[in-house]
């Protein structure tokens, strides 16, 4: 009887864990990742960066974690030539929509004149004062 009870309890535990993972399937992934080219997530992030402009991007860096993204992109014209320098952007998923965060609110790091361009540890520290929930692992390795 105790063995059957144990098997029953283990079966219920397995079913509950499967049900839990199913209900979380639509939630934001909890691991850092780079959305694949052509994926819905990547398109939504690029659309947020694009705004109303008709522009494509060369993606230099794109890392996403827990509803935050760090994207360093270069805008391209229709023939694939850069139209501007581009640069990094911080995005946040709010109510299912990616929004570009205002990096002008972030104090520069006096030890690094490139600021957001370099995402130095000092700049990232200042950025997290403004956006404290940003995960560190979306920034380039040299940032933390």
Image (tube, rainbow, N blue to C red):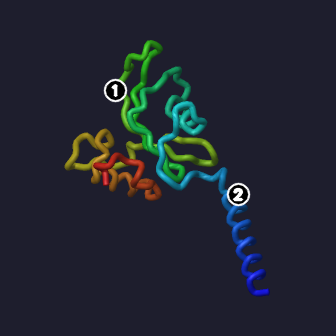
* Nearer the observer, 112 or 40: 40
Q: Left or right: 59 with respect to 124?
A: right
Which one is earlier in the sequence, the residue at label 1 or at label 2? 2
> Vertical placement of 3 versus 109: above or below?
below
**Which residue lies at the image location 42% right of the left edge and 31% below the top edge?**
59
**Which residue lies at the image location 77% right of the left edge and 82% below the top edge?**
5
**Residue 36, position in %: x, y?**
52, 36
**Which residue lies at the image location 36% right of the left edge and 34% below the top edge?**
87
Q: CA distance from mark 1 to mark 2?
A: 42 Å
Locate the N terminus and report the quarter of the image it occupies: bottom right
**Residue 65, position in %: x, y?**
49, 50
> Vertical placement of 129 versus 6: above or below?
above
**Which residue lies at the image location 40% right of the left edge and 43% below the top edge?**
103
Find residue 31 and name its label.
none
Q: Residue furthest left?
A: 111
Disc 2 target residue: 23
Q: How many marks?
A: 2
Q: Left or right: 116 with respect to 20?
A: left
**Residue 129, position in %: x, y?**
38, 57
Quadrant of the rendered image containing residue 7: bottom right
Disc 1 target residue: 85
* Nearer the observer, 135 or 35: 35
């Amino acid at each position: 009887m105790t063995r059957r009870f144990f098997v029953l309890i283990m079966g219920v535990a397995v079913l509950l864990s499967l049900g839990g993972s199913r209900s979380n399937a639509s939630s934001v992934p909890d691991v850092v990742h780079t959305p694949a080219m052509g994926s819905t997530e990547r398109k939504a992030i690029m659309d947020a960066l694009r705004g109303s402009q008709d522009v494509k991007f060369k993606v230099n860096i794109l890392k996403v974690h827990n509803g935050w993204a760090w994207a360093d992109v270069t805008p391209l014209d229709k023939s694939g030539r850069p139209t501007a320098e581009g640069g990094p952007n911080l995005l946040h998923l709010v109510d299912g929509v990616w929004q570009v965060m205002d990096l002008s609110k972030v104090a520069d790091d006096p030890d690094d004149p490139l600021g957001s361009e370099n995402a130095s540890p000092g700049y990232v520290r200042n950025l997290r004062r403004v956006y404290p929930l940003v995960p560190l692992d979306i920034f380039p390795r040299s940032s933390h």
